[in-house]
Amino acid sequence: MILPHSGTWLRPHPRVALSLLLVLACSRSPGPLPQRRPVVAPTGTAARPIPRLGYSLQAGAFAKVENAARLSGKLQAQGLEATYYASGDGLYRVRFGDFLTRDKARSEGESLKQAGTLESYWVVAPDGSAPGAGGLAHIHPKDIGGLRASLVDTARGYLGVPYLFGGTTERGFDCSGLTSAVYQLNGLRLPRSSQAQFEAGSPVELDRARAGDLVFFATSGGSRVSHVGLYLGQGAFLHAPRPGQGIREDVLADHYYQKALVGVRSYF
């Protein structure tokens, strides 16, 4: 996720070299991995909070996910980190932006309307209030339990969406694009790559992991992070495994994921 600059986070997509790195990060097929212990943290390690979003823009109310994904891809082609989601009312919507004020958000929305990119839009406040917000909102820091539950609900809304390296286009999500989108829809900014997400979080012991934390894996052997999923609790996690497979739930007790696990990170 891009930090705000003059009220917005617009910038071109990452360079090709980074794209190639992310392909390797999320698209490897499972294979034999060396046995090793996951990286854990001392008991009581405090999480470093990540930045929270300001105002954002919401567009669309699509009956077909392909149409929401197409708009998301169109916005991404203009350098906007947009994401689409199921809003809980049977419709799909698109969310994007990080603006310091409501006026700055509205100004960007009007520019996109004049350019023909959007037909209409809503400004979403940091508390998530907007028509069709679907309960995906910035939640008060004191309500951490509610935030964790909302992260899980948001992630499960993507079950079955196909994997696609590079993020939120009409064919689906890559691994870190999924976790970034889930956090974005709950008012939190995560870095875009799995390695950067790993470095941004605070380590948590596996037996102390809580729903909404992220679990990281080295799926190419060694110890470098190359895959990420969102922890659901009770040993389960949700992720975008690799091309050709939809977003799904798996368990950390699986032999492959046991060996590949690098660590758990928390952000609040």
Image: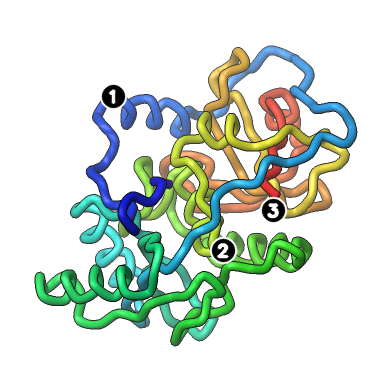
Whether 142 is drawn above or below 206: the answer is below
**Residue behind mark 1:** 17
Residue 118: where, in percent of width, then height?
A: 20, 75
**Residue behind mark 2:** 186
Q: Quadrant of residue 252?
A: top right
User: The residue tagged with tag 1: helix, strand or loop?
Assistant: helix
Q: Are marks 1 and 2 in contact (CB under 8 Å)?
A: no
Q: As rendered, which of 84 and 79 lies closer to the eye?
A: 79
Which residue is pictured at 69% across the width and 53% down the height? Answer: 212
Q: Quadrant of residue 84?
A: bottom left
Report whether 42 appears left or right of 126. Answer: right
Mark 1, other Cα within 10 Å: few <14 / some 14–19 / many ≥20: few
Give the spatial CA distance, label 2 vs label 3: 11 Å
Which residue is pictured at 88% across the width and 36% down the height? Answer: 44
**Residue behind mark 3:** 212
Please name the amino acid that badge 3 sits on: Gly
